[in-house]
């Protein structure tokens, strides 16, 4: 599943509605720690059965996208902090 959003559907809605779906929150050119501080308490209290991850893309990430729209990136090229799970 791929979900692209620009703030219309919040992370709380995604986490509670899709409890059995592996979620990956990707942020572009952003300090991830404030977002993680917001989402970790939520994740501890809603009884999810699937993993959650956060990825951080640097500001030079347009080179990951081909002319046809295919995205090709590895974990070596992104920030991938671990979330504290209950």
Image (cartoon, grey):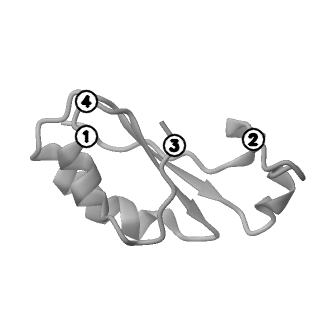
Residue sitting at 47 percent across and 63 percent down? 5
Whole-Å distance between the Cαs marked 2 and 1?
A: 25 Å
Q: Which mark is residue 73?
A: 2
Whole-Å distance between the Cαs marked 3 and 2?
A: 15 Å
The residue singled out by tag 1 in the image is 18
Whole-Å distance between the Cαs marked 3 and 4?
A: 15 Å
SS of the residue at dot 3? loop
SS of the residue at dot 2? loop
53 relative position to 45: left or right: right
Which quadrant is the C terminus positioned in?
Answer: top left
73 relative position to 29: left or right: right
31 relative position to 14: left or right: right
Marked residue nearer the N-terminal end (3 or 4): 3
State which mark lies toward you, 3 or 2. Answer: 3
The residue singled out by tag 4 in the image is 20
Seen from the viewer's position, the closer of residues 33 and 39 is 39
Task: Give how far across and how far down residue 53 sits, in percent.
Answer: 43, 42
Marked residue nearer the N-terminal end (2 or 4): 4
Residue sitting at 36 percent across and 59 percent down? 36
Q: Are marks 1 and 4 in contact (CB under 8 Å)?
A: yes
Seen from the viewer's position, the closer of residues 44 and 8 is 8
Which of the 4 image quadrants contains residue 20?
Answer: top left
State which mark lies toward you, 2 or 1. Answer: 1
Task: Give how far across and how far down residue 18 sits, in percent.
Answer: 25, 40
């Amino acid at each position: 599943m791929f979900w692209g959003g620009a703030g219309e559907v919040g992370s709380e809605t995604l986490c509670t509605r899709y409890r059995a779906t592996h979620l990956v929150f990707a942020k572009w050119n952003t300090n991830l720690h404030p977002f993680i501080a917001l989402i970790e308490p939520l994740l501890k209290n809603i009884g999810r059965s699937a993993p959650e991850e956060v990825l951080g893309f640097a500001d030079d990430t347009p080179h990951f996208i081909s002319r046809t729209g295919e995205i090709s990136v590895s974990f070596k090229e992104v920030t991938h902090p671990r979330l504290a799970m209950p």
